[in-house]
Image (tube, coloured by chain):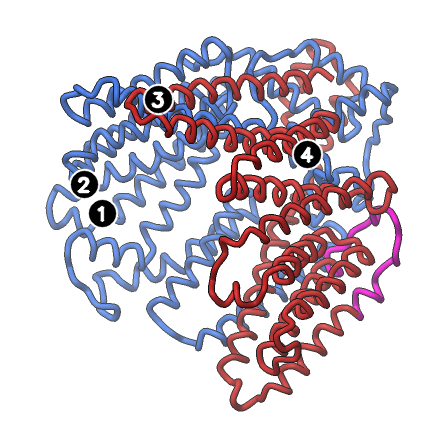
Chain colours: A red, B blue
Amino acid sequence: MNTHIFERLREQEFITDSALQIIREKEKKKLFSLHWELKTILYLGIVLLTTGLGILVYKNIDTIGHQVIVAMIAIGCAACFGYCLKKSPGLSRLKNPVTKIWPDYILLLGCLLLLILIAYIQFQYNVFGTRLGMATFIPMIILFISAYYFDHIGVLSMAITNLAAWAGITVTPLHILQDNDFSSTSIIYTGMALGAVLLAVAHLSVLKNIKAHFAFTYKNFGAHGLLISCLAGLFTINYLWFIILAAVCAYLFITAIREKSFYFIVITLLYAYIGISYMVIELLGNIRDMGSVYLGLIYFILSGIFLIRIMMNFNKQFKKI
Amino acid sequence: MIAYNTTDLDNESVCDQATAAFRHGTIDGETYKKILSSHKSNLYTPHFFIRIGLMILTLVIISFSAGLLGLLFGGFDSITAFFIFMALVCYGSLELMVRKKQYFNAGIDNLLQWSTLFFLLGAVLINNSYEFTLMSLLMFLASAWMAWRFVDALMSLVAYFSMLIFIFLVYVKFGDIAKATAPFALMMVSALIFFLIRRMQHKSSLRYHQFCFDVVMVCTLISFYACGNYFVVKELSNEMFHLQLQLSDPIPFGWLFWILTVTIPVIYIFTGLKKKDRIFLRTGLLLIAITVLTIRYYHEILAIEKAFLLAGIILVAISYACIKFLDTPKAGFTFEEDDTANKDLLQLEALILAETFGKKVEAQPQMEFGGGSGGGGGAGGTF
């Protein structure tokens, strides 16, 4: 804290002498926090360590043998989860009041090892055969359980990503993947469904007060998934998707205003802007004339200014409260 | 000369300090509200996410305006003239908007500053692309002016590095001796500016640019190291003066550069810890990593995986030991978090607190160590 400012505030009689004295004392006794520095070093160390181990294993795979490696990863994974189970305060509906650094990191490590383990045995022994869905389904379930049991948002994000991968693989027939043909529309519908489900879960978490602090993560993934699928539908299928996009944006926008969330207001406005601009360009593209180019440029300038005004307006409204 | 009303800038920092004091419980809610209401600032700084949105939209507007103007005035003699025209347009609208609406880090003003520089750069580079001396001089003048006028830290960073490049380019024109001593000359320049800032930083007439000075200070530390770094010196002189040195070829005074490469980061870290100076400490930590990379580039002491393993074990051990050691604060150091996270959010939160618990927050004259209330928390889910 800047003592000069408080000295001036004292002169103007905003604060009392005793308060100024306390501030001076505190400034003198202030501790130098090494939190950020030490945490970064720790994180870097873990990354280097695991990378080094990975390379070491990769280089010596002939002498070590696959069974040994699988066993080692499995033991490491089990150790991590065991440690977390021992330290965990147990399942609860609410947010854990204290979060400890070590169990958090160890849990993350355990989850990463789990994913590596499953990928490894699938790749080496083809355990799941062509049922790739199973290879993503099992870790997904474990990740979701750990996220809820240990109350870890990072693991929840991993679980949701896994869910998306599982849904994508499950709806995509194998031959499409092999032919590298991603223009299939089924993936768009899956994205829509997944986004809607995630938004519903976000809503329910708050409503039923089950890990309400997870709601933002669900909503974030859900909103982006839904909106990207809508845009993809608009670009590749037909203009009907514009109406769906508008409806989704309207819903998200209304909830964002109710929750006073700047983040969701900005992203829905930008997604809607992309959709509308696409429609305008398509419309202008039909007029094969130089005039349409000018119109397009003017459209972008004016719409940009308009949107800036809208955003500033919301900023003002929320600040008042 | 500063584009903003200086009372506004002062009031802004008073409010920040009052927020911090209220959060620490040294002043009560009534006082806090009174300070806030009597130190109103007209500067326009919207919420973080709104700023990003405004930035994207400003980029859209500027690029399409450039397209439209380019089409309309298709008769511009040269593309250089068009770029200069665009730079002037951007700067003009920046001045206008700041004067009328007091935008201060609102996203719009930042992007207008960047695009002014971009068009200026384009104007010089697009036709005769070897005018680096002129370019760096122009960049320096423009960004230094904007850093001063709009109190912008990023502009001060650009200004510092373009000045360094300009000095380097002019200096090496003096011949072979100059080329050989260029690293030392630039180190001197860095050191000079460092000490200059050290002296100016605490002048109260320069208080608005405090953050700019901090940023330039980090830059001086980095450039001082970079000019003594073996890799930078060797590869840059190789590139600039077409020496065609091989990987294992020595350079004159090589041993000196190796000493500098290794010792400077260590000195920075020790200075940082001794003086409790975060700038030195963090820069030193960053540069240690670069030193390690530099050494490995020329001398493959260990196989990569062993080097990774060793470094990882050392880092984990160091941090583990330090975290355990600082379980209770020692020698003025602590592992507790500083709660200077998100300024915007803090002020809003504090205001709500002041509204709900208007009564006096008891002032704890001396907090026991380690008894962190855990109130600092994070941003939580409230975006």
Q: Chain of mark 1?
A: B
Instruction: Indicate whether A114 appears above or below B67.
Output: below
Could you tell whether A20 is left or right of A149 in the image?
A: left
Q: Residue furthest bottom?
A: A63
Label 2: how many Cα within 10 Å (few below 14, some 14–19, many 20+): some
Could you tell whether A51 is left or right of A247 in the image?
A: left
Q: Are marks 1 and 4 on the same chain?
A: yes
Please name which of the two marks, 2 or 3, marks the residue nearer to the observer.
Answer: 3
Check if mark 4's residue and mark 2's residue have beta carbons within 8 Å: no
State the residue position of label 1. B182
Please name which of the two marks, 4 or 2, marks the residue nearer to the observer.
Answer: 4
**Image position, residue A35 (x, y; %):** 66, 49
**Image position, residue A214 (x, y; %):** 76, 46
State the residue position of label 3. B65
Q: CA distance from mark 4 to mark 2?
A: 51 Å
Is label 2 in a helix, a strand or a loop?
helix
Q: Are marks 3 and 4 on the same chain?
A: yes
State the residue position of label 2. B171
Label 1: how many Cα within 10 Å (few below 14, some 14–19, many 20+): many
Label 4: how many Cα within 10 Å (few below 14, some 14–19, many 20+): some
Type of the residue with mark 2: Tyr
Q: CA distance from mark 3 to mark 4?
A: 33 Å
Instruction: Indicate whether B14 appears above or below B337.
Output: above
Please name which of the two marks, 3 or 1, marks the residue nearer to the observer.
Answer: 3
Check if mark 3's residue and mark 1's residue have beta carbons within 8 Å: no
State the residue position of label 4. B383
Identify the image quadrant of the C terminus of chain A: top right
Type of the residue with mark 3: Ser
